[in-house]
Every structure is written in structure tokens, then in C-alpha cells.
Image (cartoon, rainbow, N blue to C red):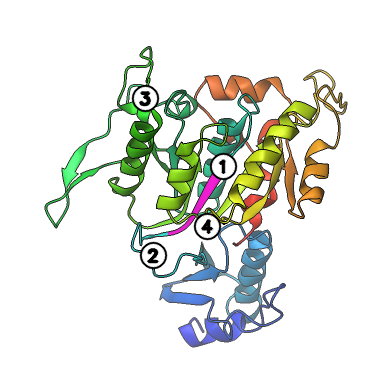
Amino acid sequence: MLTAEAVLKALSYVEEPDLGQDLVTLNMIENVAIDGRTVSFTVVLTTPACPLKQLIHDACERAIHTMVAADANVVITMTSRVTSLRQGNAILPGVKNIIAIASGKGGVGKSTVAANLAVALAATGARVGLVDADISGPSVPVMFNVEAARPEVLQNAQGQNRIQPIVQYGVKLMSIGFLAPAEAAVVWRGPMASSALKQFITEVEWGELDYLLLDLPPGTSDIHLTLVQTVPVTGAVIVTTPQKVALADAQKGLQMFRQPQINVPVLGVIENMAWFTPAELPGSKYFIFGEGGGQRLAAQHDVPLLGQLPLIQSIREDGDAGRPAVLDPASPAGAAFAALELTTKDW
């Protein structure tokens, strides 16, 4: 018989593989409903990027068909509760985690990594925002194919003017590129740039977010110092290539976050352009910029290597087309971004 009680009893035999207890005991089952021969319910995961999501989904469906009704139409909604490491913060109280994506050197693909990470996290069901904090070289409008977009300014319930972020591919976006002509150079001194960035973050209607990613400009300038001291950042990710000159600058960027006046945890290192794989030889690897540099940097500073990304022509083509590679997870480029540990880690 199709009843909510029968559904919960069946699901009490489905175990969460990592935690070793059943879903009902762990309070992971919500919104059980019966409509004719349709059984619907929600499974609340501990992280939106749970690598066992499909396994749990299939186990729940099998339990209903085996123990409740073989002909039932089972509709399962997979959602999550993201842990917040920013409890009690007055700035952006609706944002659970603020993650800085940084590099010591320009040209290492930091913005490409930030864009794909944002889309990858959104694809798992997380609520994601991305701030393009590179005032002099904004790239988010191009990478998200929203170059012509202009944000609205609306009043909230308290009568305050709030900038409405641009939404694309499930990610809320803000960039100086939305406010200045694409061909215009933004030449600002440090204090002006810092003030603009703070406005982007604190005066934008971000709403409830699981992750707000900050695509920082390269280097270790006063902009970085002002930003991380103003905004309570959860952690930082360092992007580098394997070559020696990039690693030297990446090390400075990593050490910046560990300065006592900043004290932001470094979540790990992402090595971009780790090897070259030509399209006609998908199984080949050519280490053009050196080999293992990201691993050595991570080991030297006792942080995880979150992943290695190959140098693939389609990644550049996808970025220029305004469609991040991770939107096609079946492609070699998309699979590389989807495999980053950052998208499967609950901070």
C-alpha cells in the first residue's frame, strides 16, 4: 500500500555510505508525498557535490520498488545543506562561504578556472555567485557571454538601492565590465579600485548563496589586502602553472593569505596547463611548461593539490565563446574541471 509510513520504512533500509547510518535516522528524507501511484520525496545531502549522489538516488528508488510498490512512479529531489564557516558575520549574512580564487602571476588561467568552478558548483545544486574583482582586466562578461548585459539598481524593502547581479548558467555575476564600455581602459589608483570592489560585494543583492567566488586580480597588491580585510573570506584557492616563474609568484600569493594581518586559510592549489593534449591524440601528454610544479608547491606548504587541468584548445575556444567548458562534462575539457576536488568538497 502506498503510504508515507511505508515509504519511510523502506528508506530506513537505505544507508548513507560515508556516514554508515540510514537516511531516515540521519533526517535526510523530507517532503514525502503520495499522489495516486506517484511517490515523491526529497533527499537532503550534506554537500551539493556529493560524489555518491547517484548511488543514493538509485538505492532509494530500488527500495521503493522492492518494499512498497513495484509499479510506483518514484520522483526524487536531491538537494543539500551546505555547511557555513561564516557564522555571525554582519557582512553578507546570507552568504555561507566566500572563496578567493588567486594567483601571483597573470596569464595562468585564473579567471577561466574561477568561471568553470562557479558553473560546476551551480550544476551540483549549490547557489553560487561570482565577483570579477580584476578591475583593469575584467573577463567574466566574455566568459559568460553577457557582454551586453547591464545590471539594474532596485530599492529593497528598507529603501536601499541594491545592484541586481546578472545571472547566467545558474551563477549570479558582478563585474566592472558590466558598467564600463568593453573598449575603455579602467585606470584607477588602488584606493578607488578597492572601494569599487567593496561596493560590488556589499551593495549587490546576492541573496542566499552557498558560495561566493572572488576572482582576484593577479599579484599581491593593496587591493588584495583591503579586500580580504574588509570581506570575511572563508578560504583561498591558488591557481598556477607548472613553470618555475609562475610557481615563484604563486608562492608569494599563497604566503600573502597566511600573513597575520590577513590570516585566510589556503584551501589548496590548482595546477592549470599541466600538460598539452592535442585533439587528434587525446591519450597523449606533453609537459610544455614543466611537470609536477603544482604538486611540489602544495606539498611544500602542506595544502592539498585540488587538481590538474590540461592545456586543451577547446578550453580557450569555450571561454572565447562565452560557454565555460564544464557545461559539457562529457568533453575532455569539461571532465577535467568537473573532476576538481573543490567541486566535491564540503568546506
Q: Position of residue 327 (x, y in %)?
A: 57, 36
In which quadrant is the C terminus drawn?
bottom right
Q: Is residue 335 visible?
A: no
Label 1 residue SS: strand
Using the image, tell me which numbered label, if any, was put on residue 101: 1
Identify the main secondary structure in magenta. Answer: strand
Report the magenta residues as a range. 96-100
Apparent side of residue 159 relative to residue 1 in the rendered image (left or right): left
Crowd band around label 1 with a 10 angstrom C-alpha radius: few (<14), some (14–19), many (20+): many
Task: Choose top left, top right, bottom left or bottom right for residue 94.
Answer: bottom left
Along the polypeptide, which appears first: circle 3 or circle 4? Answer: 3
**Rendered position, 52 above or below 227:** below
Marks 3 & 4, CB-CB < 8 Å contact:
no
The residue labelled by disc 3 is 188
Q: Nearer the viewer, mark 3 or mark 4?
A: 3
Crowd band around label 2 with a 10 angstrom C-alpha radius: few (<14), some (14–19), many (20+): few
